[in-house]
Amino acid sequence: MNYSIKDLERISGIKAHTLRIWEKRYSLLTPLRSDSNIRFYGDNDLIKLLNINTLIKGGWKISHIGKLTNEELGFEVERLFNQVNQDTVDCTPYINALVVAMLDMNEREFEKIFSTVTTRFGIKETMMRVINPFLQQVGLMWTVWKVHPGHEHFASNMIRRKLFGAIDQLIPLPPKPNKYLLYLPEGEHHEIGLLFANYWLRSEGFDTIYLGQNVPFNAIQQVVEKNKPSSLLTFFIVNTEKEQVKSYLKLLSENFPTQTIYVSGSQYIFADLEIPSNINILTSPETLERIMQQ
């Protein structure tokens, strides 16, 4: 991949002006030039910049970082990575390490990072403090067309696999009265949020029926009629057309008047929409936690 300095700014959060100073003073990055003499950077520059950013977040000064060889830089990032503790608010080392593993499509490294974080924080905290910001970072990189579908599929499938494994390992608890039906509407395939909700609900003792992605509406009707869940939970990720979302919410409300319906997704989708009374918008994972405590 080729990156402009503005791309590096958007992805790393470090100002282009600062990057130019670092480049001139410490030779931290090595831009190339296109046939039309436009400067650009490669994946190695981005990976190095993410590692530099990790050390800066860890308290290093750029003047000290500028003296490190690439090998020393990697060693110090690894050392800092292993020092992060549960009370640390800034999980940048983990997030950047996952981005680097994704760009390299390094399954072993991705596995190692995920396992390290979940061992320290548990699945719930890992998803909220590391994986969700990581996915937001990947989304930002999509906006500047600096990840290709292979990157996104690689990372998503790794996370999905981990969530399925975590769900399988849950110890059954005495069931609570509410039963949740979880699914994604037709055309929706990004199920990490839904899988996480399934894990969280089941870890708290709630029964769930998990249908997964791209489920036709008539299938939802059949399952509700037969299994009588008390609640439905779904997400809008790809479908962001307000009128289509409005129509679908109305369809849900009219067909399942006795169920409580929870919907999540990009919040601007729901802005200015008239939401039926039996539909609740989940604005964050913490909202789901409050619901479970009711």
Image: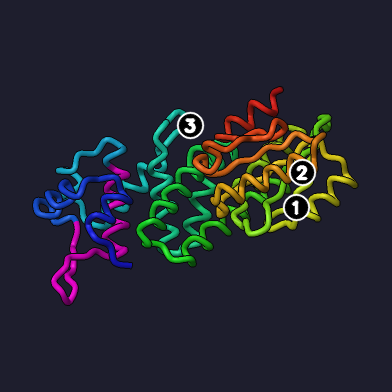
Dot 1 corresponds to which residue? 211
Circle nearer the N terminus (2, 1): 2
Residue at the spot 28% in from the left edge and 56% down from the top edge: 7
Q: CA distance from mark 3 to mark 1?
A: 34 Å
- Answer above or below: position of 39 versus 223: below
Q: Nearer the viewer, residue 77 or 222?
A: 222
Q: Quadrant of residue 288?
A: top right
Q: Which residues are magenta?
A: 29-55
Amino acid type indicated by mark 2: Leu
Closest to the observer, 194 or 237:
237
* x, y percent for residue 219: 80, 55
Q: Which disc is residue 181 wearing? A: 2
Q: Is residue 120 visible?
A: no
What is the secondary structure assignment of the residue under circle 3? loop
26 or 278, which lies in front? Answer: 278
Quadrant where the image shows the C terminus: top right
In magenta stretch: residue 47: yes
Q: Is residue 278 left or right of residue 87?
A: right
**Badges 2 and 1: C-beta atoms under 8 Å apart?**
yes
Question: Residue under circle 3?
Answer: 86
